[in-house]
Amino acid sequence: MNAFFMSNPSMNPIVPATLPEAPRHAALGESAPRPSSLAGLLLAMLSLGACATMPGGDIAPVGTSAQHRALCDTPPKGVLNTVKLQALLDKEARVKKSPGMVMAVQVGDSPPWIGVTGCEDAACTRKMTPDSKFRIGSITKNFVGTAILQQVDEGKLRLDDTLERWLPGVFSNIDGKGITLRQLLNHTSGIESYTEAVEWITTLYMRPTQHWKSPEALLSLAEALHEDSIKRWTVISPGTRFSYSNTNYVLLGMISAKADGYSTIEWEKVIQNRFINKLGLSNTRIPSKKDVTLGSTNRGHVNFHNFFGNSRSGESNCVIVDPNCENTDRDFTEQDMSSAWSAGEMISTAGDLLKWVNAELKGPLLSKAIRAQQQTFIETCHWINCPTDNILVGLGIFKQTKYGFIGHRGEIFGFNGTFQYLPRKDLTVVVLSNRTALDGNHVGNMPEEVAGILFPSLRRQRANETDADTTDNIQHIRLPAQFTPFRSP
């Protein structure tokens, strides 16, 4: 169990408190405090300077004013309670039974802390490292969504453009004239997710390195699922409600490629040229055709017996796919990611995802106007006891309602991860795990736990509410209807 401070690997993890820089109100979208006089400015400076670091790393304010407490609740530059952060990481890896994890934490522009725990493989022959690579699954969607939003900024696209305008006749049984880019981005298109097809999940389970002719093969699965929805009277009308669909981002990948002048099968060129090259994401890549490797010594693990959940009889649904399915972990590192394409194909590291968050959510990648569109959030729930009632959806991004984190989770067989940004505290957290979550116990709760450690006032503000972390139960891999996901055998 160890940690890595990017600014200086040898530095003491607890750094004495220093005078903090002015708060980044522009990044937070807040109004900067305006002292009415020089005396007021000096008072504010003295108040900030009076913040002390308590044993255990919390920031202890001197005085009792609300303004003073708010100022002192922000750790000064370089001060992170790395002892507690490492303990959290170690604990979560044990609870989630992950062979290994990497967690990156950054406040403002201060040097980030990257902690690691466990190993890259189940036998623990190789320790996890800060530079370990992971398949990031649905976090890919955030890259694709941001490319679309950039193209809107550039006048190449409009959010209310229709699917038919950009991909005429792409489906034989779905009317593209009634579906907009906005609806694809926020999963209100009503288009079925191709991962709900038994053929998709069976093929991937039995032959993970099989190459898919994408996007055609994936879209044909969605078309067949829609035909079944028509027969069962379960079609979702576009724009009426949220329904997470991987097919949406296959279509957006095609559209982004076409808008930039490429063939509709060349979405990876959009991401490579707009983001990977320009931002120096040297550890981020999109596998080339028929490349089934991770490009790293890290290994991905999944227990399909658990992932598929139970039938009503209590037997794992895994037997529907494989009668000999065993209740044990399987190394699922080598995969042909044409099975996910622009909905989940990318590979990255915690450090590169930190760069990505800084550029996308705080940097110059998007204009103020289009970022406001991106972060116009709507409900994901439309019935009582909905499992995602604490999650809102924007354009290629989600919001957790407890503290207000915005970001995206990712799941792909063998791996799960999340990146989250808390604007009110200018806090970024990235967590990556080399196993598919057991019973849906993914890493999505960890950014909120980090916030509770670094900013105790957040916990105090919610003292009269539930202390539970937001549960993001959005199924990034939409299983076939006959499966009941996230149930223990």
Image: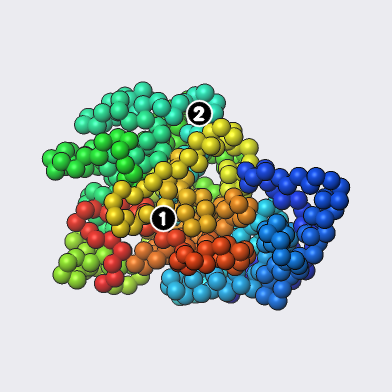
Q: Position of residue 106 (x, y in %)?
A: 64, 57
Relative depth, front residue between 241 and 251: 241
Residue visible at 28% across and 26% down?
169
Residue visible at 82% across and 55% down?
43
Q: Where is residue 138 in the image (x, y as percent from the top left)?
A: 42, 50
Relative depth, front residue between 431 and 406: 406
Upstream in sequence: badge 1 or badge 2: 2
Three-letter amino acid code at the position of disc 2: Val
Q: Which of marks 1 and 2 is in front?
A: 1
Q: Give residue 102's quadrant in the image.
A: bottom right
Residue visible at 71% across and 65% down?
64
Residue hosting label 1: 390
Three-letter amino acid code at the position of disc 1: Asn
Question: How many numbered badges does the structure rendering display?
Answer: 2
Could you tell whether 300 is left or right of 63 in the image? Answer: left
Residue 203 can be seen, yes or no: no
Could you tell whether 131 is left or right of 288 in the image? Answer: right
Residue visible at 51% across and 74% down?
91
Q: Where is residue 140 in the image (x, y as percent from the top left)?
A: 46, 46
Residue hosting label 2: 152
Residue 317 can be seen, yes or no: yes
Relative depth, front residue between 205 and 109: 109
Q: Indicate how the structure is coloured in the image.
A: rainbow
